[in-house]
Amino acid sequence: MKKLEDYIRTIPDFPEPGIMFRDITTVLGDADGFKLAIDEMSKVLEGVDFDVIAGTESRGFIFGTPLAYNFHKPFALVRKKGKLPYKTVSTEYDLEYGKAEIEMHIDSIKPGQKVVLVDDLIATGGTMEAAATLVEKLGGEVVKMVFLLELAGLEGRKRLSKYDVSTIVAYPGK
């Protein structure tokens, strides 16, 4: 039986020399690989008390919606600024070379709701830290963060140390 790592393609020196790019399109492009990814992410949510799953644009949508379906929970979108049609709450955060802003609908999380945040990758942790800020602004509580991959060398887990973080596959580098 294949492990999830067997479905992940590694591309050396992309986007620049020295980087080992972990490509998840090969997971998504294989029905068994995608099912295994969702099954493994579901396992880390067993026994977790939560009300809503929220995912960050765009790969958090890919993994978060089947998880929400499996657990019969609503799914909340965390999107780049200007993409949501209704009233929003937003937060700005730092990128390596600049800033970004994400937002959620003001009614996507209700006060007191317990939220699981989902994304494909934890690198520096900046995007997920900003997503957690949005959930908390709306009165929700982040009870778990789930990632398919972790690039441990970028130390995103340290940045998110106040949260319960789970990853399925961790790579030691960047």
Image (tube, grey):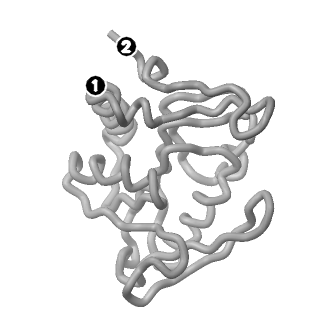
Residue at 36 percent of width and 46 percent of height: 48
Q: Which quarter shows the N terminus?
A: top left
Q: Residues within 10 Å of mark 1 (few under 14, many from 20)?
A: few
Q: Between 152 and 48, which is closer to the camera in this rendering?
A: 152
Q: For residue 136, say whether it is visible.
A: no
Across and down, in percent, residue 127 comes to 61, 60
Give yes or no for contact between labels 2 and 1 (Cβ–Cβ under 8 Å).
yes
Tag 1: amino acid = Asp
The answer to whether residue 36 is left or right of residue 101 is: left
Q: Which mark, by number, is residue 101?
A: none
Q: Give the residue type that dot 2 points to.
A: Lys
Q: Position of residue 16 (x, y in %)?
A: 77, 38
Q: Which residue is mark 2?
A: 2
**In the displayed image of the protein, which residue is found farthest to the bottom?**
87
Q: Quadrant of residue 128?
A: bottom right
| Residue 61 vertical placement versus 77 (above, below) | above
Count of picture labels: 2
Image coordinates of residue 141 in percent, x first then y, are 47, 65
**Which quadrant is the C terminus positioned in?**
top right
The residues bearing labels 2 and 1 have C-alpha atoms spaced at a distance of: 9 Å
Residue receiving disc 1? 32
Badge 2: residue crowd in 10 Å (few <14, some 14–19, many ≥20) = few
Q: Residue at x 41, y 17 (%)?
A: 3
